[in-house]
Amino acid sequence: MNETEILKKENKKEALSSLKKNGKAEKSKPGRGRYKKGDGVSALLFLSPTLVVFATFILFPVIFSFYLSFQKWNMFSSQTTFVGLDNYIRMFKSEEFWQVLKNTAVYTFGTIPLNMGFSLLVAYALNKKIIGKKFLRTAFFAPVIVSPVAAAVIWRWLYDPNFGLINWFIGLFGINPVNWLNDPTAAMFALIIMGVWKTFGYNMVLFSAGLQGIPETYYEAAMIDGASGWTRFWKITIPLLSPTTFFIMVMSMIGSFQVFDIVYVLTSGGPLGSTKVLVFYVYEHAFKYFDMGYASAVAYVLFAILFIFTMLQIKYMKSKVLGN
Amino acid sequence: MPEKTIKTNKALKTTAKVSKGIFFHLVIYALALATLAPFIWMVLTSLKDMNEIYVYPPKWLPDKFHFENYKNAFEAAPFGRYYLNSIIVALSVTLGQLITCSMAAFAFARLRFRGSNILFYLFLGTMMIPYNVTMIPSFMMLYWLGWIDSFKALIVPGLASAFGTFLLRQFFMTIPKELEEAAYIDGASRFKVLWRIIIPLAKPALATLAIFTFMGAFNDFIWALIVLNSDEMRTVQLGLAIFRDRYLTQWDLLMAGSVTAVLPILLVFFFAQKYFIKGITLSGLKE
């Protein structure tokens, strides 16, 4: 599109809207500042860098990959072939796809309860009187910020079957060494443990913020009534924290469904495909087999799943807001 | 008599409370130690020689610190070059986002134009689009542009951010308008107002955005994996992943490489912790 054309259009619109506004009473919101002529043009200028990047690397790709999901294309030929729903049919008939979807779900629903339980526990503890709060918070948060690649390299060493720290540790309790990364069942478990370690600090911060939002007076009143610490936790903290909890749950679901980096380095999807997750599957089909149409179709299925999660979140938020 | 029992009861209660407090501290510090253990083990391993690494039960401290592991790792792969690449990319993306996001945020916070609300919600909506939906066409675009295996491929797609725009807009809205009004009366342009008045006042928010962006760009892996081919273009993360494939069991070198990849971000974090926390709570609870 021609940029000057857009600018002209904006100018016209602006002129029209200012005419309308002059005709009617000023409807400007309080505190929004006085209306200045030509704001539309400036806004376009201020927004243009972002709009160009978004149009190129988000808007166009989202539309184009939808189109691609109905095509057969290896990227290097100049021709794409329309195949209708073939990619989707192939996907739903593929045993591997269902296995991958199952792996992703197992990872997600394995990580989330552990992650949330642990992060809430730590946040609750850090909300109390405790020595060295700052150090503790730093310690629990550190895994979040380090690169997933380096973290996964470290964990490969921790999971080493013969010399790894983890087998040594469980050995102290008389548990036999586990071949963590080469046994299909153990590998998923290993991935989940590492996933929890890597992400719980993030949720801890969100829980902490949520906990600080609960008025102290509620606890004081409960204490006067003789409620025990446990009762206070279940009857005050948990219910009042539920919006935070729900938010964290949905965000964790969205995040876990897109896990890739740690899988790539820790297990490379193995052994026997037992830790191959959706994004890994998309990556493999797109950039190893160059089956762009099929990869786009799988990506869109993932998009649909995440869309449902997001809608759940929005619906819940709305009902909360309207309920108040 | 009864007075005495009350006293002992009280004493018992306080000892119970104190021991409970000690127990509580022990548990939480044990958890913290467990969380840090992988890092400690990484650093210790990176300073051992192979004979000390392959022992069971594990030996905690090396007899001698083998700092030459780092030298060897840097010789086995051009980590210095990887580093330079990562820093160039992360700094460019961060600087770019600070500029584009503050401009866009200014438009949303201060300028009145048609469809501003709809556009803002569209911006927010882009945050829920998963990466791998846009990844294939984005790769193709870069391929057609001839940008594959270049810094441009790593930098340009990251030059805008809905999260950053949102974060800054929220902050800009809290800045009182009186100063700007005065500047406009003196004939200042909008750019001048943004640059001279808003930006200096928004330093904490900009710092938060800068730290988050830098961390994300420095730690990014999948995009580098897709768009880079040649060894000298690799970032630290990609370099480390490929290093892992080559030196599968050379744990001295692998751990030295990992320390290298982890260190800058950990340092930034220790000095700027509050900005991390602020960024998360802002993104998490104000939506």
Image (tube, rainbow, N blue to C red):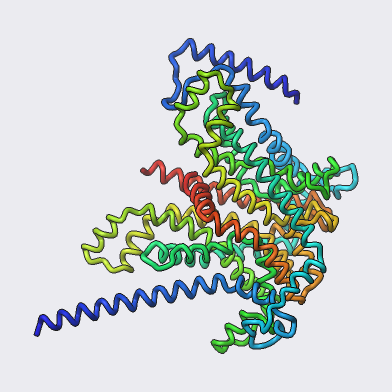
Rendered-image quadrant of the N terminus of chain A: top right
Q: Is residue A113 visible?
A: yes
Q: Whole-percent x and y of residue A65? A: 74, 44
Rendered-image quadrant of the C terminus of chain A: top left
Residue beneath the point at 61% across and 45% down: B127
Q: Whole-percent x and y of residue B263? A: 65, 62
Extreme residue toward the right, this view: A77
Residue B6, by quadrant, is bottom left
Q: Is residue A249 above or below residue B167?
A: below
Q: Is residue A122 left or right of residue A216?
A: right
Q: Is residue A31 above or below residue A91?
A: above
Residue B47, by quadrant, is bottom right
Q: Is residue A84 visible?
A: no
Comparing A80 with B278, the one in front is B278
Q: Is residue B54 above or below residue A24?
A: below
Residue beneath the point at 74% across and 70% down: B70
Residue beneath the point at 60% across and 56% down: B268
Q: Whole-percent x and y of residue A233? A: 35, 64
